[in-house]
Amino acid sequence: MRATPTARDHYNRHPYEVGLAQAHTYANAPGPTGSFLRSASGQIAIDVGCGPGNLLAALAQRARISVGVDISDVSVRLARSVAEASADRVRVVQGNALGLPFRSACADIVVATGCLHHTGDAWAAFREVTRLLRPGGRGIVTVYRRSSYYHALYRTAARLPRWADGRPGFDRVVNRGLLMPAFWLYFWVGRLVTHRRVRPPSYGEARNYFADQLLNPVVTFHTEADVRGWAETAGVVVEQLSTSHAGALLNATIARPVGSGSTAG
């Protein structure tokens, strides 16, 4: 019987290295994350679940120090290679979003745009993320939306590629032979629409995105009511709640009111 893989196992095999690491790609992108990045400012910015460091350079343009944290050894190593270009302003550490290695109220900007729904306990991770915000600090949190096509896709059709993954013969036929060519085209079209990127993705980039979307073993889905309830309990304000990626993502721009303290428990 095979051991159940964890999110750390998954991203050690398939880091979210998808060819979109450039600062301008994210800072100028339409949608909630790009809008937040253009408006954010402060001394300390923390990217929770930073992956291979895709957002770190953009955050470094908005803060004096940009810190990335990720649970995956491979992702941390890749992010540190990104950080070398801005060594005086970017740091990367390894850590778990369910117990972040930072003191409370230490950051002016907190970003968690692809992490909470892979922890197995999104509410606990949200509480940790918001714990880091200083009074007056702002953040953006993204989770997978329950009422979406992606929820239905992950729960039904994506069972086949997850079953084939790790079984070399089936993976070669089902995932690499049948599904990957179609997904490569889907990924390229999505990149054109979202990031205005004309260059087609490489096979490796598309494979990493395919794995992130369809093979991830730890995925949860959430509602607007979930996020608003988490925010109220954590003592932060939801400034804006929106959807993106055809409704698959639920994005919450949050702020900790001036005069309030962080909620650690």
Image: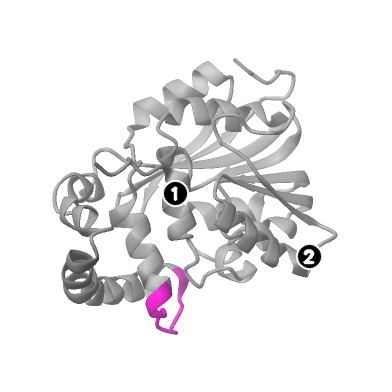
Relative side of 142 to 189, left or right: right
Report, in whole angstroms, how far the alpha carbon at label 2 lies from the one at label 1: 28 Å
| Farthest-out residue, front | 1
Residue at 73%, 48% in the rendered image: 41
Say above or below: 244 vs 98. Answer: below
Q: Is residue 52 visible?
A: yes
Say above or below: 225 vs 250. Answer: above
Residues 34 and 202: in front is 202
- Kind of residue at badge 1: Asp
Task: State which quarter of the image contains the N terminus.
Answer: top left
Residue 180 belongs to the span the image colors magenta: no
Q: Position of residue 197 (x, y in %)?
A: 46, 78
Residue at 20%, 70% in the rendered image: 179
Mark drawn on residue 86:
2
Q: Magenta stretch?
A: 195-204
Q: Position of residue 144 (x, y in %)?
A: 35, 43
Relative side of 53 to 165, left or right: right
Q: Position of residue 191 (x, y in %)?
A: 40, 72
Q: Position of residue 62 (x, y in %)?
A: 73, 55
The residue to which callout 1 is attached is 9
- Kind of residue at badge 2: Ser
